[in-house]
Image: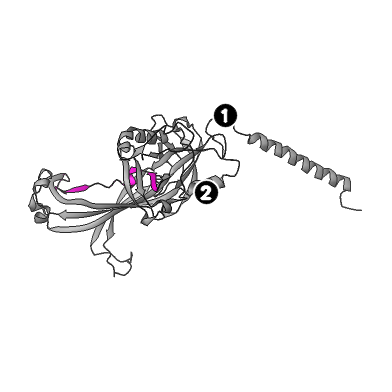
């Protein structure tokens, strides 16, 4: 007896499969309709966004900052108090003079390029090194003594983006530590900045974000350019900050956050990555010298040690500076900027990106 099914049954089965495929296509069309509600999207983009993301990524830069300090160290018998700093010769009373530097890195975005003048937007905490750092002796009960142990004075600071012309050194054009926003600028030869990519998408409205809205984030974790995604939580209420669940690592600070209004390619700039929750652990570590062999943890350590302060990042929750705070920061300093040769006219009245004009 022939065990193969009749040809009609095979044909009917194939027809059923094809019919199911047609129904499935119709279901997908209903699940992913064309968006046209005028709001930011909470759906994962259902069409290719790679060309637009690549274009945007070209305007995203790794910014590095390094501050150089001279530190004067005193012994307790010097009896130098804070109020006496200006009256005392640091060189004369210091028992030791130390030179050191502090570094930071993050993300900056080119928002303007005209006539050789380049402006980048970033977070202030990346470049805001203090001019003076004072430490005090500690009393036996753990309280701070009024006597100064060391004074560190910043001698100079360098901010730079490696792939900009002339070593990419930048000046601080404007900075607001409270809002944590800063503008960096530099004037290069015009021929060196031709074609330098500028972020050209609209500046949006972070107060219009809602629970579950989808966002893209650019940054430089571990000094590598990365784009990632997130979902908005605790939408903005005070025009200052909101939360997203994007994965965060050091280097993302200053990175731009983009929402989508009515589908790709309608990206809008809605915020700057600010920070992530973190804790600090203090650990005793061996004082390893340059030529020492690797420390064997099975042998009791009897050498010198030091206290190491280590930051422990708690990923999964990232704070974002709302774009309204960035706009207010610039507009509040319009007069100052104008005196330096900048005129801001109808800054965000059009769907274009930042309009920044120079006086002639």
Pointer 1 with pointer 2, Cβ within 8 A: no
Q: Is 168 within the magenta? A: no
- The CA distance from mark 1 to mark 2 is 26 Å
Per the rendering, the mark at residue 37 is 1
Mark 2 packing: few (<14 Cα in 10 Å), some, or many (20+)? few
**N-term mark: 1 or 2:** 1
Foreground label between 1 and 2? 2
**In the image, what residue occupies the spot 42% across and 35% down?**
323
Q: For residue 349, which quarter of the picture?
A: top left
Q: Is residue 346 above or below residue 153?
A: above
**In the image, what residue occupies the spot 29% across and 45% down?**
128
Which residue range is magenta in the image? 115-143
Q: Quadrant of the C terminus?
A: top left
**In the image, what residue occupies the spot 9% across and 56% down?**
92
Left or right of 50 on screen, residue 111: left
The x and y percentages for residue 260 are 53, 37
Query: What residue is pinned by disc 2?
Result: 54
Q: Is residue 281 visible?
A: yes
Left or right of 228 on screen, residue 181: left
Per the rendering, the mark at residue 7 is none
| Element carrying mark 1 | loop
Left or right of 147 on screen, residue 28: right
Q: Is residue 6 visible?
A: no
The answer to which of 344 and 199 lies nearer the viewer is 344
Q: Is residue 327 above or below residue 89?
A: above
The answer to which of 171 and 189 lies nearer the viewer is 189
Q: Is 137 within the magenta? A: yes
The x and y percentages for residue 170 are 34, 50
Q: How many numbered discs, if any? A: 2
């Amino acid at each position: 007896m022939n065990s193969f099914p009749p040809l009609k049954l095979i044909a009917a089965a194939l027809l059923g499969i094809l019919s199911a495929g047609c129904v499935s296509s119709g279901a997908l069309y209903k699940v992913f309709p064309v968006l046209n509600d005028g709001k930011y999207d909470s759906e994962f983009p259902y069409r290719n966004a790679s060309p637009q993301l690549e274009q945007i990524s070209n305007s995203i830069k790794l910014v590095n900052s390094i501050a150089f300090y001279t530190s004067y160290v005193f012994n307790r018998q010097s009896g130098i108090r804070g109020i006496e700093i200006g009256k005392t010769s640091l060189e004369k009373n210091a028992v030791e003079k130390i030179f050191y530097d502090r570094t930071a890195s993050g993300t900056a975005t080119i928002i303007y390029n005209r006539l050789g003048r380049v402006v980048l937007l970033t977070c202030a905490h990346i470049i805001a090194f203090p001019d003076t750092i004072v430490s005090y002796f500690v009393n036996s009960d753990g309280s701070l003594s009024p006597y100064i142990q060391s004074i560190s004075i910043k001698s100079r600071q360098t901010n730079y983006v490696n792939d900009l012309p002339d070593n990419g050194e930048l000046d601080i054009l404007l900075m607001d530590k409270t809002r944590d926003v800063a503008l960096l600028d530099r004037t290069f030869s015009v021929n060196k900045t031709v074609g330098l990519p500028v972020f050209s998408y609209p500046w949006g409205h972070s107060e219009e974000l809602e629970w579950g809205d989808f966002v893209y984030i650019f940054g430089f974790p571990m000094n590598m350019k990365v784009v990632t995604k997130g979902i908005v939580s605790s939408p903005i209420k005070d025009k200052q900050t909101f939360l997203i669940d994007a994965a965060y690592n050091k280097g993302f600070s200053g990175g731009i956050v983009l929402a989508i209004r009515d589908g790709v390619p309608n990206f809008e700039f809605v915020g700057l990555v600010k920070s992530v929750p973190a804790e600090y652990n203090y650990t005793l570590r061996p004082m390893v010298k340059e030529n020492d062999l690797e420390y064997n943890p099975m042998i009791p350590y009897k050498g010198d040690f030091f206290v190491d302060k280590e930051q422990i990042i708690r990923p999964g929750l990232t704070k974002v500076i709302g774009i309204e705070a960035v706009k207010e920061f610039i507009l509040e300093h319009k007069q100052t900027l104008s005196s330096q040769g900048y005129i801001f006219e109808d800054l965000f009245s059009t769907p274009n990106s930042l309009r920044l004009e120079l006086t002639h």
